Image: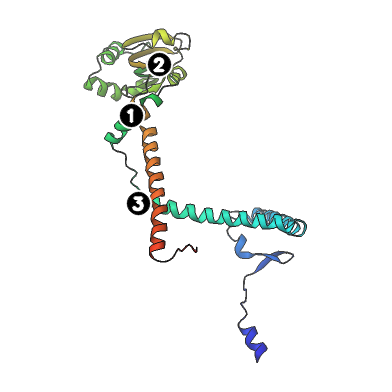
């Protein structure tokens, strides 16, 4: 009866083994999600077999290490494993708390305040400009009308040009955003590193012709290397900086609060 009772309370493992290395088993549950639906039988078998072989090779190395490495080295590794496990749990829990509690919205006022306090760090390492352009065929019938609307560029002109933009080889009419000068050079073949300083000047209108057609360009503003970057250009960076600062502050508060609460609830004690 004693033997029967002991056998009764033994924990049984009803998982289906698919491979064994010494006393370690690989089970069907471990490989059931390896192959995506729709994979052919031949490819499925190849994927599974390769996985099993890799698993076996790794397990054999682990078993060999346990036999051949010194106890002190194994103890050192086990401590590292436990620390890694602790770090994973800690990070996951902190990230969940941060995601739940942190405000990720950066207001315009906050961004402006940070920008004004740290202008020196926002120096440009590349040239920027605000401009609009149209690339079109020089023989287009309504060229003069397009030229007039492009140069005057009131709200109706902009609407009209967008409406007929299918006639253009390429174009960009949003002249309120900053773009990199190198992007302009790469997009417009008539502009080169050699002539860009001459052509891309503030408030300059440019009309160029080459074998590919005619380019109409209006440069509204230009910023050079080492100029202070405009707020709207660095706003995404500022938002990220502000959010990261909030995150660090929140994590510090969480660390203090969780310890304080544990002491209060007698979950944490230091024995003197």
Q: Quadrant of residue 37?
A: bottom right
> Could you tell whether 113 is left or right of 4 in the image?
left
Q: Which mark is residue 215?
A: none
Position of the N terminus by quadrant: bottom right
Label 1 close to label 2 by CB (< 8 Å):
no
User: Badge 1, how many Cα within 10 Å: few under 14, some, many 20+?
Assistant: few
Instruction: Identify the residue under disc 3.
Output: 101
Mark 3 against mark 1, which lies toward the viewer? 1
Image coords of residue 249 (percent x, y): 38, 45
Label ID, residue 117: 1
Q: Secondary structure at mark 1?
A: helix
- Asked if marks 2 and 3 touch (Cβ < 8 Å), the reply is no
- 77 left or right of 214 in image: right
Q: Nearer the viewer, residue 40 or 90?
A: 90
Q: Position of residue 113 (x, y in %)?
A: 30, 32
Q: Quadrant of residue 145?
A: top left
Specify whether residue 264 is in view: yes
Residue drawn at x 25%, y 17% is 153
Q: Identify the residue at horizontal 37%, vertical 43% (top origin).
A: 246
Tell me the residue that label 2 is attached to.
224
């Amino acid at each position: 009866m004693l033997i029967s009772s002991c056998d009764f309370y033994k924990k049984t493992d009803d998982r289906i083994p698919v491979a064994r290395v010494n006393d370690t088993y690989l089970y069907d549950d471990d490989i059931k999600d390896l192959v995506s639906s729709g994979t052919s039988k031949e490819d499925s078998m190849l994927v599974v077999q390769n996985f099993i072989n890799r698993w076996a090779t790794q397990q054999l190395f682990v078993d060999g290490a346990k036999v051949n490495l010194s106890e002190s080295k194994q103890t050192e590794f086990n401590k590292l494993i436990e620390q890694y496990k602790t770090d994973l749990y800690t990070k996951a829990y902190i990230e969940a708390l941060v995601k739940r509690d942190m405000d990720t919205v950066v207001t315009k006022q906050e961004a402006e305040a940070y920008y004004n306090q740290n202008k020196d760090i926002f120096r440009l390492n590349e040239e920027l400009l605000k401009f609009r352009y149209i690339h079109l065929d020089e023989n287009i019938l309504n060229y003069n009308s397009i030229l007039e609307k492009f140069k005057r560029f009131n709200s109706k002109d902009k609407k009209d040009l967008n409406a007929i933009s299918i006639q253009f080889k390429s174009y960009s009419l949003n002249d309120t955003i900053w773009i990199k000068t190198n992007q302009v050079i790469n997009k417009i073949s008539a502009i080169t590193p050699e002539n860009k300083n001459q052509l891309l000047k503030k408030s300059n209108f440019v009309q160029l012709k080459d074998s590919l057609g005619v380019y109409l360009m209006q440069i509204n503003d230009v910023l050079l290397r080492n100029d202070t970057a405009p707020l709207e250009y660095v706003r995404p960076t500022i938002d990220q900086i502000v959010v990261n600062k909030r995150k660090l502050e929140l994590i510090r508060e969480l660390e203090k609060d969780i310890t304080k609460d544990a002491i209060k609830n007698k979950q944490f004690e230091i024995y003197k």
